[in-house]
Image (cartoon, grey):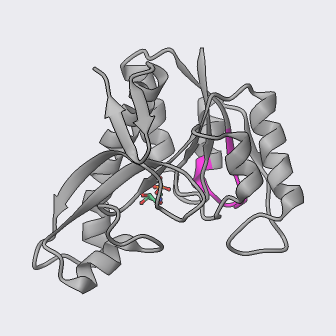
């Protein structure tokens, strides 16, 4: 069975979308473990409700990344579940070299903008303040840079005159919940190939 590990710090709506899609499509994909750095993350509640193994591994020393010892704990837990793919779903820590090397080419992320535009935090707000007409979301492989890895799928969301950061983020998230499960499906089926920065989809 193709096994994924999901890392989330916040609401966990992408985790829920993955769970629902796997069930609905009867995908041969198992969520082996859900990990969070945040004890109050709703992702942990979702995992509990769904009977998925979960663990909170907090980081005490740093705010934006994991100390080497904490990172080792994440790696150990993911390996103990024989995870084939690590899915970052709103995980608010930048992964360092060891983690990325251990899961080389096997970490994906979802970002709330059309990368390479608006990397970093609150990307929907960046797009709104910039006056862009369109934004959206992107799934991509994770490499050393922040939000710079090869792009897998994107979905476009128009920005409306009356949008607030909240209404825009809500519409972006609706698209996230479509492209993230689809990304995982394609990878689990071996339909995704990478050549340099380009991702090929063989359907
Ligand atoms: C999403 O907007 C995602 O693009 C970003 O973090 C947010 C996570 O949302 N990386 P949720 O916790 O899955 O609802």
> Where is residue 101 shown, x and y percent of the image?
71, 46
Q: Is residue 189 above or below residue 59?
A: above
Q: Residue 185: in sight, yes or no?
A: yes
Q: Residue 20: in sight, yes or no?
A: no
The quadrant in which the N terminus is found is top right
In the foreground, 187 or 91: 187
Q: Residue at x 78, y 32 (%)?
A: 79
Please give the count of numbered marks on the rendered protein: 0
Question: Magenta part of the protein: which range?
Answer: 34-43
In the foreground, 3 or 19: 3
Q: Is residue 194 above or below residue 110?
A: above
Residue extending furthest toward the right: 69
Name which quarter of the figure residue 114 lies in.
bottom left
Name which quarter of the figure residue 180 lies in.
top left
The quadrant in which the C terminus is found is top left
Residue 10 horizontal side relative to residue 61, left or right: left
**178 inside magenta stretch:** no
Q: Residue at x 32, y 56 (%)?
A: 137
**37 inside magenta stretch:** yes
> Where is residue 78 shown, x and y percent of the image?
74, 36
Residue 140 horizontal side relative to residue 62, left or right: left
Q: Residue at x 84, y 57 (%)?
A: 70
Residue 152 horizontal side relative to residue 83, left or right: left
> Where is residue 57 shown, x and y percent of the image?
79, 54
> Where is residue 197 shown, x and y percent of the image?
41, 48
Q: Residue at x 85, y 49 (%)?
A: 72
Residue extending furthest toward the left: 161
Q: Is residue 168 above or below residue 27?
A: below
């Amino acid at each position: 069975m193709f096994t994924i590990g999901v890392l989330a710090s916040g609401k966990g709506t992408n985790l829920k979308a993955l769970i629902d899609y796997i069930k609905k499509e009867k995908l041969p994909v198992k969520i082996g473990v859900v990990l969070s750095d945040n004890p109050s993350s709703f992702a942990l509640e979702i995992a509990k409700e769904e009977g998925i193994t979960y663990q909170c591994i907090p980081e005490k020393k740093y705010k934006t990344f994991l100390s080497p010892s904490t990172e080792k704990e994440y790696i150990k837990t993911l390996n103990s579940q024989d995870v084939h793919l690590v899915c970052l779903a709103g995980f608010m820590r930048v992964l360092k070299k060891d983690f990325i090397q251990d899961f080389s080419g096997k970490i994906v992320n979802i970002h709330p903008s059309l990368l390479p535009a608006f990397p970093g935090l609150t990307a929907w707000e960046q797009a709104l303040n910039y006056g862009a007409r369109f934004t959206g979301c992107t799934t991509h492989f994770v490499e050393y840079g922040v939000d710079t890895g090869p792009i897998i799928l994107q979905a476009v969301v128009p920005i409306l005159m009356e949008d607030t950061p909240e209404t825009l983020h809500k519409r972006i998230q609706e698209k996230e919940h479509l492209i993230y499960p689809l990304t995982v499906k394609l990878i689990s089926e071996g339909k995704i190939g990478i050549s340099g920065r380009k991702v090929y989809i063989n359907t």
